[in-house]
Image: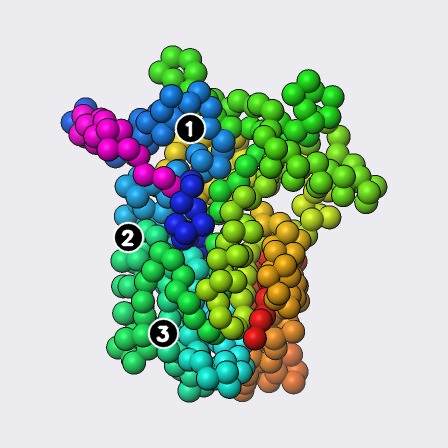
Amino acid sequence: MRKFSFDTLSCHATALSPRKSVIVTSVQAWLSAQCSDPQRRWVLTMQMALKALFGADPWIGFDRFMGFALLDPEHGFYSQAGPVFGGDGHFVTAPLLGDWLARLVAQQAVDLAPQIEALNQAFSVCEYGPGNGRLAVDLLAGMGRQGLWPNHYELIEASAARQAEQAAVLTSGLGGISAATRLQWAKIMSPLSGLLVANEFLDALPVRLFEWQPDHPDGPVLEWGLGLAGPGERLQWQARAAETQLREQVIARAKAACERGLGWRPGHRGEWCPGLRPWVQTVSQQLLAGEVLVVDYGYEAYELDHCDRPFGTLAGHSGHRRIDDREELINRPGTIDLTSHVNFTELAQAFLDEGFEVGLHTQAAWMLDQGILDQARDLLFEGVGRAAGAVPSDRAALAQLSQLQMLLGDSAMGQSFMVLSARRL
């Protein structure tokens, strides 16, 4: 699911100073001796590290907290040694629902490769947020079935724990085929031509939280962040007047909502992702020619900023449970996946500004346009009387059909997920 590249998030994952690192290390040693519960020790250590992150500042923006809670190399959510994805982890993503998504992406790669080679460039693949490596396995297998082997397959992954998990899944899944020698891991995308895939990556870029208060003396835009207060200096939500960049972003969105006849009421909350456009700019610089596929949950601006969505989209996930309680989101740092919906209007405009041709569809519409039903028919319905509408009888095929329904269903992932394609050759 969600991973990160430090090239666009360095401001959120800044290393602690040597002195602060020594303090945190000493506290960790003391906690190991005093606290026998690993989960509790994890939380206490993260809380101490957060205090070091504050330093002399009485307040930090939520984006700094989010980046730290997810990316801290030792105790961040994605640094944990245990499983993050799948039934034994915290959530399930599309690549874990069969190889349906990979089949369609593989076909995109096969169609794109000759165009790249016509430019006298080698065709490569880059994947942001490789999850547990399952998409890479199925995508390489799908390309291989059609005789396409990329020059290299680059996995952008910052976490050492996730890299190890991906390597194990890829080694097992690829079975030693030649594609295994073409794999490479990086924290920053290398210059390449070909296909870039980002599946459920952007939803976990750190966000800043705002509140619309046109009549407030510090308004019209407040920013919610965190302070340390009370006994034990616990994390507490605190609001202050937004600085210029955030204020201008929010005022523009509020004005657009008003022009649509859906003006915000006082107290309307939402998120803005400061790393979204820098990520697009990085991709634009490094992708010499090719196509970008972004698959994620999110909305276009008219829906994201609808007046009937007054609480924003910030949420957490832990143990397959969605968490909306904002107190819980900040009091269990490092144990909860933090996320918000992608603003696909802003994302599309960022790619347009970089000279890409852009297409945007719901996940269901994109998969149907790419011929997923034909693939399902050939894979699942051959020999079972498909002309009469019969369904497969064996459990494996039924499970695959159920997974496809999850990806396409209106009440599942079909409408809540979107696919953005951006091409520049």
User: How far is disc 1 from disc 3 in space, using C-alphas?
Assistant: 42 Å
* Quadrant where the N terminus is found in the figure: bottom left
Question: Which residue bears the numbered disc 1?
Answer: 331
User: How far is disc 1 from disc 2 in space, using C-alphas?
Assistant: 25 Å
Please determine whether, in this image, residue 141 is positioned above or below residue 51: below
Question: Which residue bears the numbered disc 2?
Answer: 160
Label 3 Cα neighbours within 10 Å, binned few <14 / some 14-19 / many ≥20: some
Question: Which residue bears the numbered disc 3?
Answer: 152
Chief SS of the magenta region = helix
Residue 172 in the figure: left or right of residue 198: left
Region in magenta:
13-31
In this orientation, does residue 151 appear? Answer: yes
Label 2 Cα neighbours within 10 Å, binned few <14 / some 14-19 / many ≥20: some
Going from N to C along the chain, the mark reached first, 1 or 2, is: 2
Please determine whether, in this image, residue 15 is positioned above or below residue 177: above
Which residue type does callout 1 highlight? Asn
**Residue drawn at the location 24% of the way across and 29% of the way down:** 19
